[in-house]
Image (cartoon, rainbow, N blue to C red):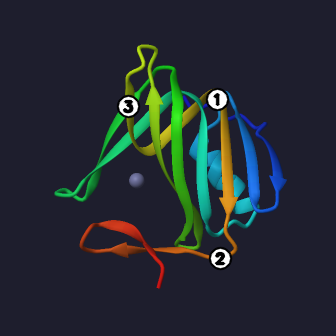
């Protein structure tokens, strides 16, 4: 069951936004809503913290679809990185994650879903432009369109 938690904290400095997400929050949903509310149309995302539910994706170029795998365990976010663009008039954070287990092994992939465990410390660097994504038939992906 999805836990809905409102309580994220943030602080702005220039074009930097520092976010603290709370335990139980849907990481991508909270990020997307924050990006929309602040009118961010391009930028980069980085972060650390922890999750206690994670769904990773791996893009299969043959089937042109994401293989998905769920992890229902406490994992440290060792690195979260991504970018912000606009897809179909909506903010689209594209995020990858490397997460670590208690035995120091790591797993990682394209971030599909993460529920924050303890905390997530995210930094968004907003760029003063608008970057769009566009569907690419050959790859089946929505790729950046920088033309
Ligand atoms: Zn990806």
Label 2, label 1: how far apart the Cα atoms are: 32 Å
Q: Nearer the viewer, residue 25 or 74?
A: 74
Residue where numbered disc 1 is placed: 24
Q: Say if 119 sits above or below 140 in the image.
A: above
Image coordinates of residue 100 in percent, x first then y, are 45, 25
Q: Say if 127 sits above or below 63 in the image.
A: below
How many neighbours does mark 2 have within 10 angstroms: few (below 14), some (14-19), or many (20 or more)?
A: few
- Mark 3: is the Cβ under 8 angstroms from ligand 1? no
Asked whether the beta carbons under mark 2 and mark 1 sit within 8 Å of each other, the answer is no
Of the image marks 2 and 3, the number of the one nearer the N terminus: 3
Label 2, label 3: how far apart the Cα atoms are: 33 Å
Q: Secondary structure at mark 3?
A: strand
Q: Quadrant of residue 7?
A: top right
Residue where numbered disc 3 is placed: 107
Image coordinates of residue 129 in percent, x first then y, are 65, 76
Residue where numbered disc 2 is placed: 129
Residue shown at 29% from the left, 66% from the top: 140
Label 1, label 3: how far apart the Cα atoms are: 21 Å
Residue shown at 35% from the left, 44% from the top: 57
How many neighbours does mark 3 have within 10 angstroms: few (below 14), some (14-19), or many (20 or more)?
A: some
Image coordinates of residue 61 in percent, x first then y, are 21, 57
Q: Secondary structure at mark 1?
A: loop
Of the image marks 2 and 1, the number of the one nearer the N terminus: 1
Image coordinates of residue 74 in percent, x first then y, are 51, 20
- Mark 1: is the Cβ under 8 angstroms from ligand 1? no
Q: Quadrant of residue 126?
A: bottom right
Of tags 2 and 1, the one toward the viewer is: 2
């Amino acid at each position: 069951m999805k836990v809905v938690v409102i309580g994220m904290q943030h602080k702005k400095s220039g074009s930097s936004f520092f976010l603290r997400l709370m335990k139980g929050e849907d990481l991508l949903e909270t990020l997307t809503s924050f990006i929309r509310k602040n009118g961010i149309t391009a930028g980069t995302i980085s972060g650390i913290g922890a999750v206690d539910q994670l769904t990773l994706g791996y893009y299969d170029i043959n089937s042109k679809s994401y293989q998905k795998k769920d992890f229902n365990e406490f994992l440290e976010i060792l690195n979260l990185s991504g970018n912000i663009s606009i897809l179909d008039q909506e903010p689209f954070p594209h995020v990858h994650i490397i997460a670590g287990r208690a035995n120091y092994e790591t797993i990682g992939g394209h971030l599909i879903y993460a529920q924050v465990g303890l905390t997530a410390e995210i930094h968004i660097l907003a760029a003063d432009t608008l970057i769009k994504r566009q569907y690419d038939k050959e790859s089946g992906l929505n790729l950046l369109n920088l033309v």
